[in-house]
Image: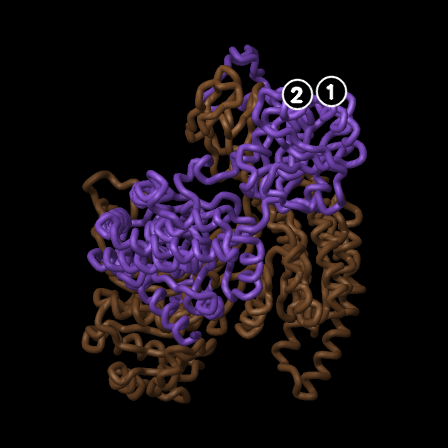
Chain colours: A purple, B brown
Amino acid sequence: MSVDAEQIARRAKHAFEEAQQRLTQGAAADQARSAALEQIRAHLQDARDEIEAANKEDMRLANEQVAAGNLSASLASRLDLFSKPGKWESMLQGVSDVAALPSPLDVCTYAKRLAEPTSKSGALDLYRLTCPIGVLLCIFEARPEVIINIASLAIKSGNAAILKGGKESKHTAAVMAKVVAAALATTPLPSDLVQTVETRGDVAALLHQDRYVDLVIPRGSNELVRSIQREARMPVMGHADGLCAGYVHEDAEVEMTVATVIDAKTDYPAACNALETLLLHRSHLTSGLWTTLSSALLQVGVTLHCDAESLPVASQSLSLLPSSSSSSSSAKVGKVVAATAEDFDTEFLDLDLAIKVVSDVDEAIRHINEHGSHHTDIILCRPLDADAHTTYNPTPGAQGASGEMASPVEHPAAKKFTQSLSSANVFVNASSRFADGFRYGFGTEVGISTGRTHARGPVGLEGLVIYKYVVKAQGRGPQTAAEFNGAPQDGGEKREWAHNDIEMRYPRF
Amino acid sequence: MSVDAEQIARRAKHAFEEAQQRLTQGAAADQARSAALEQIRAHLQDARDEIEAANKEDMRLANEQVAAGNLSASLASRLDLFSKPGKWESMLQGVSDVAALPSPLDVCTYAKRLAEPTSKSGALDLYRLTCPIGVLLCIFEARPEVIINIASLAIKSGNAAILKGGKESKHTAAVMAKVVAAALATTPLPSDLVQTVETRGDVAALLHQDRYVDLVIPRGSNELVRSIQREARMPVMGHADGLCAGYVHEDAEVEMTVATVIDAKTDYPAACNALETLLLHRSHLTSGLWTTLSSALLQVGVTLHCDAESLPVASQSLSLLPSSSSSSSSAKVGKVVAATAEDFDTEFLDLDLAIKVVSDVDEAIRHINEHGSHHTDIILCRPLDADAHTTYNPTPGAQGASGEMASPVEHPAAKKFTQSLSSANVFVNASSRFADGFRYGFGTEVGISTGRTHARGPVGLEGLVIYKYVVKAQGRGPQTAAEFNGAPQDGGEKREWAHNDIEMRYPRF
C-alpha cells in the first residue's frame, strides 16, 4: 500500500515538474492550461454514456446501502449526476468557467531595485512572482462532480492533484479520472497531472509523503479534517466548524436586525456560514427589539435556546403567536427552550439559535473568542454612513440623496468588533451568509478555510498559489554579496543597498 | 507536564485576545506596540548587570561541557552576549529597529463593492485586511539574543509568542524573559504576550495544543525541523536544507561567472544560501571558462568534487597552480576529487563544490528538481539588457550609456530557468548569497522558509500576519443573501452582484 502511495506521489511531483518545464511563457502557458480544460470538457461530453452507466452503478449500490440502513437517502441522492436536470451540464460549464478566470500565476506582488547600477555593473532587481504550490492532495465527500471541479482548479493554477472522493462514488470517479487522463494526453500537459486514489489506506500513506505532496485540502466533516491534521506531515488547508455568532449592539435598528438575523439563520441553516449564536445587548430586553426579533424568529420556525435573561420575553412572544394550525403561513412555529451550556458550543446546522444577553461589545467579543470557531461573526448596529469611494462622491458638507453623511461619524463598537475579533470574516450590518467565494467575487471557491496561515475564509484560485523571488542582474559585471559587505574582491568601493520601488510586473528575460 | 503546556498555551491565546481587544485603533495600536518595544529596550538596558551575570553562568556551564568534550567551542562562544564589543548594543538597537518598521497590520490587500446601493439599502463593501496570526511557538538555537529579536517581531506584528531557546542559554533566557514581562507590565499590553519554556518536553506537549497555538517556527537543524513537522498538529514554518545549485549556460561570460560563483561559494560557506552544486554546460569543457573557473575556485581553497567529464580540466588547472607554500596568497589551495553520487545530495556548508556537466538548461532543471532543496538556484548567462523601469527611461531606439539596449532581447534559457524551477529564490546572473531578508529590503528577517505555503524564502514581518475579510454594509435597510437568490423576503426585485473595485484602504467605522 505505502509503496503504491509513494509511486503515485512521485508521479504527481514529476508531472508537476514536467508541466512547469513544458509551459514556460506566462500568457501562452495560461492559454495552454485553459485549452486543456476545454479538452477535458469535450472528452467528458463524449464519454457521457460511459460516465452515466458508472454513476447508475454507484447509485444502485448506494440504494442497496440505504435499504440496508447503512447510508442516508440524502447522501445517496447527492451521488446522482444525471437525474436532476442541469446538474451534468452545470458540471461541464464549471470547467469552462474556471478556464475563463484570470490566471492566478505570474502575478508580481513585490518589486524592488536592490541596488542601482555602478560603473562596473548594472542594476540588481528583485521580483516576487506567484507560482504553483506543487502537488495537492484533495480529499472530499460523496458528490462526484467535485472531482471535476477540483481537477479544473488544480490545472488552472499550475498544480498537480491527487484526488480522493467518497467511496460511494468510486465507479463514477474512476471513469471520470480515466477520461480526464485521456483528455490531458491530447494536450502539452502530462496525463499524470491529475490522479485519483480510492481507499482511506491510500490517503493515510499519502499523508506521510511530505517529500512529494505539498498541501492537503480536506473538505468534509470536522472529524475528517482533524484526523488529517493529526496525521499529515505537510500543511493542511482544512475547513472545520462554522460556529458563527451575531452581536446586536445597543443602537441596532429593529427592522435591519430582524431581516439580517433571519437571513443569517434561515437562508440555508445547514451551511457553515449560518448563524448559531445570538448575543443580545441587555438594553434590548426592554427596548422592544428582542420582542420583535424573537417573535419573527419563532414565526419562521426557529427554536430559541435562551439564557435565563432572554427567556421570559421569548416565551411571551411565543404565547402571543397564533398556533401553526390556525396560521395562514405554512411554516411551523418554533419553540423556546432554556439554553444549556453546550448550546453555546454547538453548531446546530438546523433551525436552532442559542441566545445570550451581554452587557457590551467587550463581553460579546470575549464570548466569541471563547466559544466561536473564528469562521464568521457579525455585529448589528445603527446604519453606518457611506465611505467615500470611487462610486460615491458627495459634495463636501452636503448630504447624499439617501441621507448618507459626507463626513462619516465614528462607531466605536463596530470598530472594536472588527479590529479585535480574529475571525476569518467579520461583518457589520450584513448577513453571515455573505461569507462565500462566489459572493466575494473570486469566481470560484476551493473551500472555506478555517486555518490561520496561508489562506483563510473563502479561498479562490489565489489560495492554490505561492510565490518565488526572482532576482535579475542587469548588464555586465558580476553582482556579488561581497561588494556590499565592504570587501569587494577587486578592492573597489563598498556598494550600497537601494531598496527602491520599481514597477510591479513580470521581468523580461 | 502537558497540563503546564496547556496552561501556557491558553495564557498565550488569552494574552493575544486581550491585546487585540485593548488596542483597536490602527495607527495608535502600532504606536502602542512600538512604545512597548522601547520599554523592553529600556528595561533590558537597566537589567544589564543581572543579564550579564546570568550569561556568565551559562558560559561557565558551557565551558565545562566543552572541557568534557560534550559541546563544541564554537557553540559555546555563540552564547556570549558581552565579550564581543557591540553585540549587546546591537541586540538593543535591533529592538528599536523593529519598532521603527512600518506596521504589517491593517493593510488592505483586496477591496470590492459587492453590491451597489438600491432604493431600500446602501452599498455592500468587502475589504481584506491584514491581522495577526495569533500564538506563535518559536523554537531556536543557542544564541540568547534571538529571544529578544523574536519577541520584538511577535509584538510588532500583534501576535503572542511562546519561546524555547537552546538549553545552553537557559539562565540568560530566563532573566531576559523576566525583564520582558516586567517591561510589558508597564504598557497596555498583557505581560503574558511573551512567555518562555525551557525543556523539550514542554515543546513536545505544546505541539499538540492546536486549540491555542497557531503556528510553529523552528529555526535550527534539519532534524529539529523535521521532527517538529512530524509532531506538530498546527502549521509549521520551517527552515530546512539549503542545497543551492548554479547552472552555467552556454553563453555565460567568464569574468561574471567566476566572480559570481566564487562569491556564492566562499562569501559565507556555512550559510544556507551558499552554493553547493555547479552544473556546467558541456561547451565550457573546451570554451576555456571551466579552465579559468576551476583554477579560480582552487586558488581560494575550494575542493572540487568533479564528475568524470569535468575532472580532467580541473586536474589540469590544479597542476598549473603554484603550491600554497610558494604562493604569495595565504589561502590554501583546494583539491580535486572524483564526485560520488552522494556529493550531489550533500549540503557541504564548507569549501566544497560538486561539479556536473549537463547538455542544456532542461537537464540542469531536471537535476535541480531531483537533487536540490528548492531554496536558491541561480543561472549564469550572457549579460541581460535592462528592463525599462522608473529609474531607467532610455530614449526609444537609443542605447544606454552602459551599452544597455532599449528593446530587450529575449533570453529563452533564463526565462525557462526562472519559470520552470519552483525554488523559493531563482536568480539570473546574481550570487545566491543575496537570498536574505535584509538584502531583500524587509528590514528584518524571521527566518528563511523552505515551505511551499503561507510564506517562503526570506520571511519578514509580512510572514507573521494573515488576513480577515471585513464586510461593511452602508446605510439603512437590511443586507441579506436572500435578496440575491431571487427570493427577497418582501417580494421585491432580485439584487445583482456588482464586484466593482473600490479603493484599497481601511474602512471607516
Left-right relation of B489 to B181: left
Q: Residue at x 66, y 77 (%)?
A: B76
Q: Amino acid at mark 1?
A: Gly
Q: Are marks 1 and 2 in contact (CB under 8 Å)?
A: yes
A124 over B87 or under it: above or below: above
Q: How many marks?
A: 2
Residue toward you, A281 or B31 = A281
In the image, residue B16 lies at what x, y percent?
Answer: 69, 49
Chain containing mark 1 = A
Asked if one can make out residue A159 in the rendered structure from this viewpoint, the answer is yes
Residue position for label 2: A254
- Neighbours of disc 2 within 10 Å: few (<14), some (14-19), many (20+): many
**Residue A146: percent from the left, percent from the top?**
39, 50
Q: Which residue is mark 1?
A: A288
Q: What label does residue B346 carry, if any?
A: none
Instruction: Classify the position of the N terminus of chain B by image quarter.
Output: bottom right
**Residue A19 coordinates in the image, percent (x, y):** 29, 60
Q: Residues within 10 Å of mark 1 (few under 14, many from 20)?
A: few
- Say whether mark 2 and mark 1 are on the same chain: yes
* Coordinates of residue A160 in the picture (x, y in percent): 35, 59
Task: Give B43 or B483, whichever is nearer the viewer.
Answer: B483
Nearer to us in this view, B271 or A278: A278
Tag 1's secondary structure? loop
Between residue A83 and residue A263, name the one nearer to us. Answer: A83
Residue A369 position by quadrant: top right
Residue type of the residue flagged with mark 2: Val
Per the model, the C-alpha gap separating discs 1 and 2 is 8 Å
- Specify the quadrant that holds the C terminus of chain B: top right
Residue B439 visible, this angle: no
